[in-house]
């Protein structure tokens, strides 16, 4: 398959040399839609970018630097709110990459801060955040039950003044998911950051990123998330024995499938350097027939979210993976009633009494 321009340039920045201005225009639009424009600026740091394109990239890089400062302030506010509880503040995903100084933080812009706390501490954490100005906002009784009984997080909270968002997790996957790991093992191996916060261990950061992308069902930021994995793998692979630790830890946390998918598609799409022996071991996770099916789905769904990157198959692939994510997330005896409830919810307004 012919890869989109953004995919080719991300993997090989020298491919940008000699691009005509219409191609630069397309590259900028693809990157902007994929939430990758600032990251593209880092990728092209050593490339001579023509002025009409450079102005867009520099503008987004300026925004990304301001975002980084705002993010640090938000993390500090969360830490202050939770400090009386005496529990470590374990950051996840983008906030973790920022706090740990990972290369995956470069140009990464996102909408909320994710944290991980012990499930036994959820009530105290939620109360402390409410006292500090966060609120979960209006949510009906069914959705409250959905989050608190089945999911890996409480309903998202937003600060009433700053309008910033926080997701409070007690695990990285829903309780009902067949691949739900033991969260205590994640917390036990968390490591401190220079700023006094905590993040998951390097291999667990990769595992969480892989689980989020390959066991979830949303791909509007799929390409950006795939580049997260590419950057994390490149950075952490410098550590002796990293690849063996990653596969062993994935098996321990029931994430062999997610990690195998991550290794296969970072390699196939982004040409991430992965040892052949590790890829061979990862490929044992599925039969050749299942790999053929997943190739047809993920190689389409993981391209940049721009109309020029889509094919006639893209919508079908994303729909199939969305349904797969629900099937993985909940057993059928819970999934079927849940989907029925959600499909009928828009009709509830017709039954409400009129004033």
Image (tube, grey):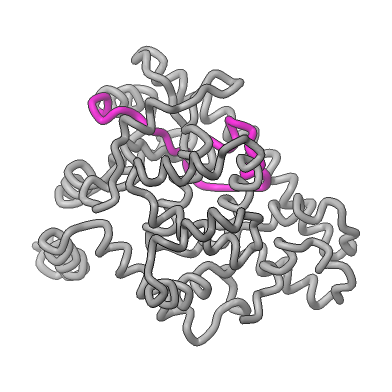
Image quadrant in which the N terminus is located:
bottom right
Question: Where 57 falls versus 287 (above or below)?
Answer: above
Q: Is residue 39 left or right of residue 20?
A: left
Residue 295 against residue 263 in the figure, above or below:
below
Figure quadrant of residue 267: bottom right
Q: Quadrant of the C terminus?
A: bottom left
Q: What is the x, y in percent for residue 95?
A: 53, 37
Q: Nearer the viewer, residue 293 or 224?
A: 293
Residue 119 drawn at (x, y percent): 26, 30
Q: Is residue 164 visible?
A: no
Which stretch did the figure color magenta? Answer: 96-122
Q: Which residue is pictured at 67% across the width and 47% down the height?
A: 107
Tag count: 0
Q: Is residue 231 visible?
A: yes
Residue at the location (17% across, 43% down)?
149
- Give percent across and percent down for residue 314: 48, 79
Q: Residue at x 59, y 21 (%)?
A: 195
Task: Determine if the magenta segment contains residue 16.
Answer: no
Q: Decide if residue 62 is on the left or right side of residue 77.
A: right
Please tell me in which quadrant of the rendered image residue 218 appears. bottom left
Residue 306: x %, y % from top left:
59, 72
Identity of the residue drawn at 27% across and 60% down: 328
Of all residues, the one furthest to the front in this rendering is 277
Relative placement, left or right, of 4 versus 189 is right
């Amino acid at each position: 398959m012919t890869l989109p321009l953004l995919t080719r340039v991300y993997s090989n920045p020298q491919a940008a040399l000699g691009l005509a201005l219409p191609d630069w225009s397309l590259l900028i639009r693809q990157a902007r839609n994929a939430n990758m424009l600032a990251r593209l600026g880092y990728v092209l740091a050593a490339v001579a970018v023509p002025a009409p394109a450079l102005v867009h990239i520099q503008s987004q890089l300026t925004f990304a630097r301001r975002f980084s400062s705002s993010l640090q302030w938000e993390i500090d506010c969360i830490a202050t709110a939770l400090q009386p509880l005496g529990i470590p503040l374990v950051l996840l995903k983008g906030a973790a990459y920022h706090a740990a100084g990972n290369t995956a933080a470069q140009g990464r812009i996102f909408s909320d801060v994710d944290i991980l706390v012990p499930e036994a501490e959820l009530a105290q954490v939620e109360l402390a955040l409410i006292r500090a100005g966060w609120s979960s906002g209006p949510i009906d009784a069914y959705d409250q039950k959905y989050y608190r009984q089945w999911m890996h997080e409480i309903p998202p909270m937003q600060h009433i003044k700053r309008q910033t968002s926080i997701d409070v997790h007690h695990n990285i996957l829903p309780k009902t998911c067949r691949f739900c790991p033991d969260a205590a093992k994640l917390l036990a191996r968390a490591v401190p950051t220079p700023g006094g916060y905590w993040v998951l261990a390097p291999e667990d950061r990769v595992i969480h990123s892989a689980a989020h992308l390959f066991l979830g069902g949303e791909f509007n930021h799929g390409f950006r998330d795939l580049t997260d994995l590419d950057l994390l793998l490149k950075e952490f692979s410098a550590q002796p024995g990293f690849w063996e630790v990653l596969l062993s830890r994935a098996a321990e946390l029931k994430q062999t499938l997610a990690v195998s998918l991550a290794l296969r598609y970072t390699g196939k799409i982004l040409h991430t350097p992965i040892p052949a022996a590790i890829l061979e071991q990862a490929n044992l996770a599925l039969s050749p027939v299942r790999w053929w099916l997943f190739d047809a789905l993920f190689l389409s769904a993981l391209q940049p979210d721009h109309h020029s990157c889509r094919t006639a198959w893209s919508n079908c692939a994303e729909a199939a993976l969305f349904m797969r994510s629900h099937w993985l997330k909940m057993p059928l005896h819970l999934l079927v009633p849940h989907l029925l409830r959600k499909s009928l919810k828009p009709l509830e307004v017709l039954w409400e009494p009129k004033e």
